[in-house]
Image (cartoon, helix red, strand yellow):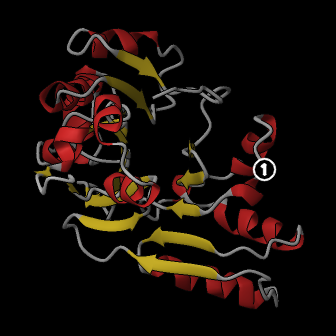
C-alpha cells in the first residue's frame, strides 16, 4: 500500500551506515531519500521471509555495477549466504568487493559488531521461522573535567590515557580514579528493532530502556488469537512490551493490509503506551 512498503530501515550514526532488512523496492526508497547505498558498511537481515530480504540481491548487484570496492559486512540466517551465492553464480557475477557474511545461528544474545561508535547485538524473537531482533548501543567517550585540568595540568600523553579510561597519578603520588576526573560526553543513545514476532516477554530484557524501539504491530487488538496463530503481535501487545521495557519511544509497523486507516492502530497502542508513533515510508526519527 502507498506509504506502507515492506520492511527496511536505515540507521546512521557518525561514520556508520547500516541497513536493517532489505525488502523489494529498498533501492527506490533510498533514492527517494537521496541516500547512497555505497555508504553502507553493514546489512542486517532479521529472517528469510520475502518481505524482509527480496531486495537484497538487487542492492548487492547495483553496488557491484557502480564500482564498489569497500567490504560490506552482512549478518543474517545461515541459509542467506547460500541463496545469494546461487544467484550470483547463476548470473556469472563476481563481486568487486568483499561480502563478509556472519551467520546468526542461535537465539542467544550475540554481539555482532563493536567499534568506538556503536555496539550491535542480536537476539532471538518468536516467529514461525528462525528470526532475530537487533539492538544498537552508542559508545560514548569520556571528557576530562575542567577543574582537574586546571589543578593538575596533565601532559598531552596523560590526557590521552585518561580519555582511554586510565587513572591518573598526581605529582605527590596520589592516584585519581578515572571516574572522578572525567564525565560522560552525553547520554549514550540506543535503538532496538523487533519485527515479525509474537508477543514474547523475554524480549524485555534485551531491549530494556532503549531510547527508541521498533516493534511490529501487524494486527489490531481484536485479532489477538490470529496474531498468536501467525506468530505476530497486536498493537496493545507491542505497547505492553514497550511499557515493560521502559523504552523512551515506540514505533509500530508491519501493518496488515486489511487496515486502510492506521490511525486506529496508533490509538490502540497509545492507550497502553502514549509515546507511540507510526512507521510509514520515508519517516525519519532522531534518537
Residue extending farthest to the right is 66
Give residue 260's position: percent from left, percent from top. 54, 18
Give residue 107's position: percent from left, percent from top. 22, 67
Quadrant of res 199: top left
Circle 1 Cα neighbour tier, 10 Å, few/some/many (<14 / 14–19 / ≥20): few
Q: Name the residue tied to disc 1.
A: 36
Is residue 94 in view from this perspective? yes
Which residue is rendered at x = 44% and y = 62% of the image?
115
Quadrant of res 201: top left
Residue extending farthest to the front is 172
Give residue 272's position: percent from left, percent from top. 20, 14
Q: Is residue 281 left or right of residue 214?
A: right
Which residue is rendered at x = 41% and y = 73% of the image?
77
Q: Quadrant of the C terminus?
A: top left
Give residue 275's position: percent from left, percent from top. 32, 14
Camera-nearest residue between 26 and 175 = 175
Camera-nearest residue between 243 and 169 = 169
Helix, strand or loop at mark 1: loop
Q: How many marks?
A: 1
Which residue is rendered at x = 28% and y = 35% of the image?
151
Which residue is rendered at x = 73% and y = 40% of the image?
29
Q: Quadrant of the N terminus?
A: top right
Is residue 195 in view from this perspective? no
Q: Is residue 14 left or right of residue 223?
A: right
Amino acid at each position: 500500500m502507498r506509504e506502507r512498503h515492506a520492511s527496511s530501515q536505515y540507521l546512521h550514526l557518525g561514520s556508520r551506515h547500516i541497513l536493517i532488512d532489505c525488502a523489494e523496492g529498498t533501492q527506490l526508497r533510498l533514492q527517494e531519500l537521496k541516500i547512497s547505498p555505497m555508504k553502507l558498511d553493514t546489512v542486517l537481515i532479521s529472517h528469510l521471509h520475502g518481505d524482509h530480504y527480496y531486495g537484497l540481491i538487487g542492492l548487492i548487484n547495483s553496488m557491484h555495477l557502480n564500482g564498489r570496492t569497500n567490504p560490506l559486512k552482512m549478518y543474517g540466517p545461515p541459509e542467506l549466504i547460500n541463496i545469494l551465492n546461487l544467484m550470483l553464480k547463476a548470473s556469472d557475477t563476481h563481486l568487486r568487493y568483499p561480502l563478509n557474511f556472519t551467520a546468526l545461528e542461535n537465539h542467544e544474545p550475540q554481539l555482532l559488531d563493536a567499534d568506538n561508535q556503536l555496539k550491535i547485538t542480536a537476539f532471538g524473537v518468536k516467529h514461525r521461522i528462525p528470526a532475530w531482533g537487533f539492538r544498537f548501543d552508542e559508545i560514548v567517550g569520556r571528557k576530562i573535567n575542567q577543574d582537574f585540568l586546571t589543578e593538575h595540568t596533565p601532559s598531552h600523553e596523560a590526557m590521552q590515557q585518561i580519555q582511554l579510561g586510565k587513572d591518573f597519578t598526581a605529582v605527590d603520588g596520589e592516584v585519581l580514579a578515572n571516574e572522578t576526573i572525567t564525565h560522560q560526553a552525553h547520554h549514550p543513545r540506543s535503538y532496538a528493532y523487533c519485527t515479525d514476532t509474537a508477543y514474547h516477554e523475554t524480549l524485555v530484557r534485551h531491549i530494556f530502556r532503549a531510547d527508541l524501539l521498533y516493534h511490529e504491530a501487524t494486527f489490531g487488538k481484536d485479532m489477538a488469537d490470529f496474531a498468536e496463530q501467525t506468530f505476530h503481535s497486536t498493537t496493545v501487545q507491542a505497547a505492553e512490551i514497550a511499557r515493560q521495557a521502559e523504552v523512551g519511544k515506540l514505533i509500530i509497523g508491519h501493518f496488515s493490509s486489511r487496515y486502510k486507516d492506521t490511525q486506529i492502530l496508533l490509538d490502540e497502542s497509545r492507550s497502553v503506551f502514549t509515546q507511540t508513533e507510526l512507521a510509514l515510508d520515508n519517516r525519519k526519527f532522531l534518537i
